[in-house]
Image (spheres, rainbow, N blue to C red):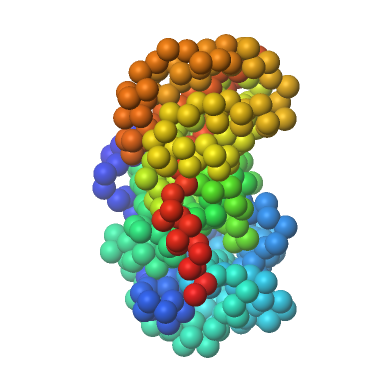
Amino acid sequence: MTEPGQLSSAIHLPNGFSFAAVTAGIKVSGRLDLAMAKAAPGTTAAALFTKNRVVAAPVEIGRQCLAKTRGRVRAVLVNSGNANCATGNAGTLTCQQISRTAAHLLGTQAAEIFPSSTGIIGVPLPAEKITAKLPELAALLEPTTRGAEQFAQAILTTDTRSKMASSQFGAGQSIVSLLGIAKGSGMIHPQMATMLVYLFTDIAASAPELKQLLREACDPTFNCMSVDGDTSTNDTVLLLASGQSGVRLRRGSVRKQFAAALLAVCRSLAGQIVADGEGVRHVIHLSVEAARHRAEALQVARAIAHSLLVKTAWAGADPNWGRILAAVGACGVPIDPRRISIYIGEQMVCRAGARCVFDEARAHQDLRRLQCDVRVLLGRGRASAVFTTTDLTQEYVKINADYST
């Protein structure tokens, strides 16, 4: 058992959930592409979705389902290889048809089936391939680590590896477990990122309680990361609570413990998504400090993280601090350049908005590492924000130039 806020190297399966995955033929690769997580009766849920105004059919239907059932979910059904986005009314009808078929197999109502899709936009979702495989998928459901790992594999697209994180803590004589499973590699940008995240726990909580905790956990994690600055149409973070541990969220210090565990799992998954970004060679932990307020710090951080000149410099491990300074100056914050300092690793490379003496070879070596810290001090206040981002490489261009062909 881990302490709240700490992760375990083992996978702790929360009680009340079963997992399975199959190959439905949606992906041309022939890999797993259809996954299900079945939840115990009475499971509550809350979700956050993409801020993109162009949204996929499963996002629209997922929102409607949570509203209709007041946060009750009996199963999560995910397909990869096809986003079911920009597919018109046919895409909506297809999603509804698949949910009805799954609900019939599981003995529940269609509104309690939460759908998700990820993959290419604008291609009709082959409903017949999915519905044909649903009986097999339902028969394979099992409350095992193997089942959860196959679920994690089946939801991937351009990811090179699955992403999981787990935590567990004691509450009186009981144990609460939390498991997070995610996918995400490209089109990663805050609010949200191009990702699907499923968080499973056996704590007992209402849907409104889960929604508040989910917002608190997502703000400093999934909303503080970026690979390429593009916002997807399918992004979803779903938190499900089966209540099977018998521990209520409102009991004593349980909320504080659970919030710490949830934050740790989300932080781990966010880090795994960025590290597995398309073509990524360098992960940058960007800290913007001495801002007037956190929103200002985030505005500066996003400007730096999305600058192509900055990102390509990082790709070459080039300590070109001038590009960082220029991005800050163009971000819209009324900064005074004479108050800005920049650090790469532990070295100050810019003081008072101008060059200072530093070891360029050492800064180059710092940026060559898989992970590097970059700090920007604005000299405006006491607020700060930490933002995780990446370089931009030729491999990223290659992956996305060939994505639909």
The part of the image, by quadrant, that contains residue 140 is: bottom left
Which quadrant is the N terminus positioned in?
A: top left
User: Where 307 falls versus 292 (above or below)?
Assistant: below
User: Where 275 falls versus 145 (above or below)?
Assistant: above
Give how far across and how far down residue 50 sits, in percent: 63, 54
User: Where 106 falls versus 282 (above or below)?
Assistant: below
Would residue 153 be visible to someone looking at this image? yes
Pick the front one: 42 or 85: 85
Which residue occupies 68% across, 55% down?
Answer: 52
Pick the front one: 302 or 59: 302
Pick the front one: 164 or 303: 303
Give how far across and how far down residue 288 sits, in percent: 55, 24
Which residue occupies 43% across, 53% down?
Answer: 394
Would residue 200 be visible to someone looking at this image? no
Compared across the picture, whether 152 is left or right of 129 comes to left
Give how far across and how far down residue 390 sits, in percent: 46, 42
The part of the image, by quadrant, that contains residue 60 is: bottom right
Which residue occupies 67% across, 76% down?
Answer: 87
